[in-house]
């Protein structure tokens, strides 16, 4: 995760330089993210004091965990090819109502591999992609299998 952050920082700085702005200018997304955190944590402090400020990062970490877990299972398909091109057989498709609601329709993600330039809200679920029977069942089965229980 540290390397991803460094890469993102470098890419943003390079893009700012191409626009004629400084690598460390106020236009950098990092500074805006820090400012957003300061404002949010100040509001949290005003509402709940220091206990609330200490609790919010835990909620943020938990939310990140669930988002990354869902992302993992989105890509942990029945057929995986290391370093190869991704096709319809490499990504799960989630078409069940609960999965679509809980996943904020990230379930259209498989369509992203058909045309990676399509905007998120324009992605359409494709019934030809492999459908995951159940996120919870697959999560449990894979976890048990890795632990040697199954």
Image: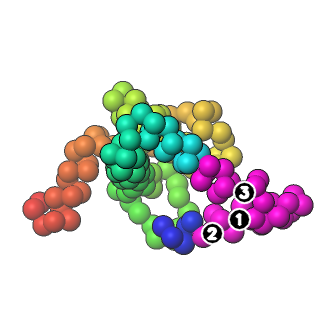
Badge 3 marks a residue whose secondary structure is loop
Q: Nearer the viewer, mark 1 or mark 3?
A: 3
Q: Position of residue 76 (x, y in %)?
A: 37, 57
- The label number, if any, that marks residue 124 in the structure image: none
Badge 1 marks a residue whose secondary structure is helix
Q: Residues within 10 Å of mark 2 (few under 14, many from 20)?
A: few
Range drawn in magenta: 6-35
Q: Are marks 1 and 2 in contact (CB under 8 Å)?
A: yes
Q: Is residue 64 visible?
A: yes
Q: Residues within 10 Å of mark 1 (few under 14, many from 20)?
A: few
Quote the CA–CA distance across marks 1 and 3.
11 Å
First in sequence, mark 2 or 3: give its number. Answer: 2
Quote the CA–CA distance across marks 1 and 2.
6 Å
- The label number, if any, that marks residue 11 in the structure image: 1
Residue indicated by mark 3: 28
- The rendered magenta stretch, by its main secondary structure, is classed as helix
Q: How many marks?
A: 3
Of 85 and 122, the residue lying toward us = 122
Badge 2 marks a residue whose secondary structure is helix
Of 94 and 33, the residue lying toward us = 33
Give the left or right position of residue 122, taking residue 25 as reference: left
Q: Nearer the viewer, mark 2 or mark 3?
A: 3
Assign the C terminus to one quadrant of the image: bottom left
Residue indicated by mark 2: 7
């Amino acid at each position: 995760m540290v390397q991803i952050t460094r890469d993102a920082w470098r890419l943003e700085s390079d893009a700012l330089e191409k626009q004629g702005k400084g690598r460390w200018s106020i236009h950098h997304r990092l500074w805006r993210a820090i400012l957003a955190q300061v404002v949010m944590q100040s509001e949290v402090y005003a509402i709940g004091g220091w206990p609330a400020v200490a609790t919010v990062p835990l909620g943020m970490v938990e939310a990140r965990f669930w988002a990354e877990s869902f992302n993992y299972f989105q890509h942990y398909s029945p057929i995986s090819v290391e370093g190869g091109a991704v096709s319809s057989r490499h990504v799960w498709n989630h078409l069940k109502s609960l999965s679509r609601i809980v996943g904020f329709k990230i379930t259209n993600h498989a369509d992203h591999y058909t045309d990676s330039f399509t905007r998120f809200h324009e992605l359409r679920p494709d019934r030809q992609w492999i459908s995951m029977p159940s996120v919870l069942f697959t999560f449990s089965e894979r976890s048990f299998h890795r632990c040697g229980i199954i």
